[in-house]
Amino acid sequence: MNKPKHVVIIGGGFAGINAAKRLAKEDDVTVTLIDRRNHHLFQPLLYQVAMAAISPADIAVPIRSILSGYDNIDVLLGVVTDIDLKNRKVHCDFGDIDYDYLISCAGATHSYFGNDQWEDYAPGLKSLEEATEIRKRMLIAYELAERETDPARQKELLTFVIVGGGPTGVELAGALGEISRYTLERDFRNIDPRRTRIILVEGASRILNQFSDEMSEHASRELERLGVTIWTNSMVSDVDDHGVVVGEEVIRAQTILWAAGVRPTEINYTLDAELDRGGRVIVQSDLSLEKYPEVFVVGDQASFAHTRDGKPLPGLAPVAIQQGRLAATNILRTIAGKTRKPFFYKDKGIMATIGRASAVLEAGKFKMSGFFAWIAWLIVHIYYLIGFRNRMMVLVQWAWSYMTVRRGARLITSKIWKTREWEMSIARGNEGKLKKRVGLAGPTGKKTGKKSASKKSVSKKSASRKPARRKSAVKKGKKR
């Protein structure tokens, strides 16, 4: 009897989970799935966690529980550091794993276009950790504004800037508009959350470039109805803990969110493969590498341009799901001595939600907007959630939020997990140190000025509330 072929899958996202399920219970293969996190995350609803609508557990399921019923699949928690294609080895932080076939679908991360230092001040939205960090910063901004007596500082605290007018940016902006105008209006006494400034900055001429002009215009009107100000043809040139610089203007803001760009995982740069301009691996029509046909790269990692118009497929969940399944199918066909199938994407359309009971949807020539588009968006996302419990919990949460205009996950969590340390910090009156530890003194808790050689210089910075390196930018720009 022939020994089963060993298939290694890197990543437990949409592509990885669907590839593993396709290979499940097959006698000809054994599967090892490696992921740096122990859970599969439903990323399309991640903004709902960031905006305190649902709990993290509602959109995340342990990978082991998803695949526990398949005896030929092992799940390992670890970080892949390198891939030796010639010797067919995956190097991990815990050791090496040999493979006969490899499916790499490690996803993508944020792109700050060469300004990675901006991440401290403007978190993106790709993981549960980032979602809960955004939730914390948003809620803390309102809490600090409630006790602030300086009108200028209060205005800065109640100003939110979202960089990027794609689906993620639009969904974040719409959810923020709803929270400020409907959810929080009765919770505070000294501030009016309805006066929150929400600015959506987009470098292109309009938001939602993937959609038609008609749908983009509808989304813009809906966002403006929720109090969102849209800046198009605007490029961000600097970001720090006091705001952003857009062209020649300075926007003073306490909370900045990044939804402007993505880049593939670092694994791509370790592969002996051709990359496109965005750093994604160029794959063959069957999703394999040209030099290494036993290796498949799919999902956000891959650049698949074998389409009618020659344009690479976008990084969408349906693309990853279909590619993961076909990569696994082609492995089984190769083992069986059959010809591999080329990948053809079945486009099921794109959609984006714009707050409560409003969305835009396009599928080919079919277009829909408003309440019924939102219902369709709701059904599709509930359908793709893994696990009956998750579907029911999210459905109940949304129904409750829709009827009551309330959000039930408005929790601020601290990085200090030792209760005694928290209490001692308060007892000592060490407020500054405590703020840094819980994230109240800026995103990183670090001094934003270049130097702090004397107490005099530190006091001047505190009085002006501007870091030293931003003086030249503020002089050139106009304050908003």
Image (tube, rainbow, N blue to C red):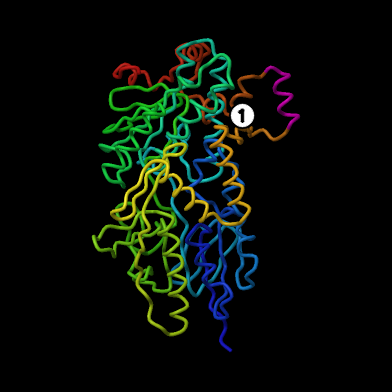
Residue with the mark numbered 1: 437
Whether residue 1 sits left or right of residue 212 in the image: it is right
At horizontal 50% and vertical 64% (from top left) the residue drawn is: 18
Is residue 323 shown in magenta?
no
Where residue 63 appears, as percent x and y from the top left, is 60, 58
> How many numbered badges does the structure rendering display?
1
Is residue 425 shown in magenta?
yes
The quadrant of the image that shows the N terminus is bottom right
Whether residue 418 sits left or right of residue 391 in the image: it is right
Q: Which residues are magenta?
A: 419-429
Secondary structure predominantly adopted by residues drawn in magenta? helix
Crowding around mark 1 (Cα neighbors within 10 Å: few <14, some 14 to 19, many 20+) is: some
Instruction: Using the rendered view, name the quadrant where residue 155 is placed.
Output: top left
Where residue 264 appears, as percent x and y from the top left, is 40, 52
Image height check: is 243 above or below 295? Answer: above
Instruction: Using the rendered view, name the quadrant where residue 387 is placed.
Output: bottom right
Q: Amino acid at mark 1?
A: Arg
Whether residue 397 sits left or right of residue 106 in the image: it is right
Instruction: Using the rendered view, name the quadrant where residue 78 is placed.
Output: bottom right
At horizontal 56% and vertical 37% (from top left) the residue drawn is: 401
Where residue 320 appears, as percent x and y from the top left, is 43, 59
Q: Residue furthest left?
A: 309
Numbered disc 1: secondary structure: helix
Where residue 163 appears, as percent x and y from the top left, is 38, 35
Front in this rendered view, residue 334 or 396: 396
The quadrant of the image that shows the C terminus is top left
Image height check: is 320 above or below 421? Answer: below
